[in-house]
Image (cartoon, rainbow, N blue to C red):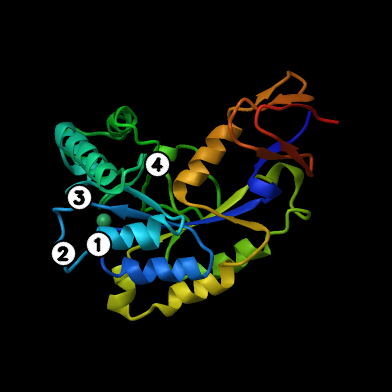
Amino acid sequence: MRYIFLRYPNGRAKAVTLSYDDGCAADVRMAETVTKYGLKCTFNLNGDALHAPSFRITDEQVRALILDAGHEVAVHGYNHRAPGAVRATAGIRDVLDCRLNLEKRFGRIIRGMAYPDSGIRLFSNGSDPEGVKRYLRDLGIVYARTLGGDNADFCLPEDFLCWMPTAHHNNSALFDMVDRFLALDFTKIYSAGRYPRLFYLWGHSYEFDRADNWDVIERFGERMGGRDDIWYATNIEIYDYVTAFHSLVFSADESIVYNPTLKDLWLDVDGRSVFIASGETLHIQ
Ligand SMILES: [Zn+2]
């Protein structure tokens, strides 16, 4: 029996993603900053009627600085309603209205989300986590970022509809976590621990304006950006890649693997890097 783990594109074991909320005007500087460092960020936007024009990034800026630069736009509730705090009908409407609004504004399919406010916790009005996740699936949402927990082990989510980030940028241990993440050496990790790692940073770009601490994201970019051993990806790119990996078909003794997906995929098999092209059947030696 072998230990077989997911590897990101080009066999890399580490990935970094960012997620920033509310579509505020400071997203302009945020998008320019993350692009400068080669990072990828998901920007979670509300309906275009929620915020005053002076508060928000314009649709033209979203197209030029976010979408054309390879970042992602995702749902954050048309009216920014916490699903746990409203009845299901209102929660469904807030997500669906937002998805319809964003897809019409930007002319693309949008399947990602960050929960507004309290994430998928603090329930009232008869809502519950399974009920919320059920209607998100029905509404075509494939992942949703939550908050309030701890993912300092850099694990991929077990449940993409309850995706816990690694840290908020105000976390006092942020750069200790960054150092620990960068120092991970997979040749020195015991065999069962060679699962892929993800560093997931989140926040609101207006917080940098209010706290006058844009140096935090600049330092993050300087430390994390431009590394050959890291895959920089948006939230949906990670979801799509991991989902494709989980579609691999193995023989019972794991010596034959078939890739039925449209993506080229990488695996780690007992410490060895293995590549399997889209549509390929491979005999693993
Ligand atoms: Zn928000």
- Residue 88, image x, y percentages: 18, 32
- Residue 130, image x, y percentages: 32, 30
Mark 1 and mark 2 lie on one chain; the one further toward the N terminus is 2
Q: CA distance from mark 4 to mark 1?
A: 29 Å
Q: CA distance from mark 2 to mark 3?
A: 12 Å
Badge nearest the viewer, 1 or 3:
1
Mark 2 and mark 4 lie on one chain; the one further toward the N terminus is 2
Numbered mark located on residue 47 in the image: 3
Q: Name the residue that disc number 4 marks.
A: 162
| Badge 2 amino acid | Pro
Q: Name the residue that disc number 1 marks.
A: 58
In the foreground, 62 or 98: 62
Circle 2 Cα neighbour tier, 10 Å, few/some/many (<14 / 14–19 / ≥20)? few
On-image quarter of the C terminus: top right
- In the rendered image, which quarter is residue 143 located in? top left
Numbered mark located on residue 53 in the image: 2
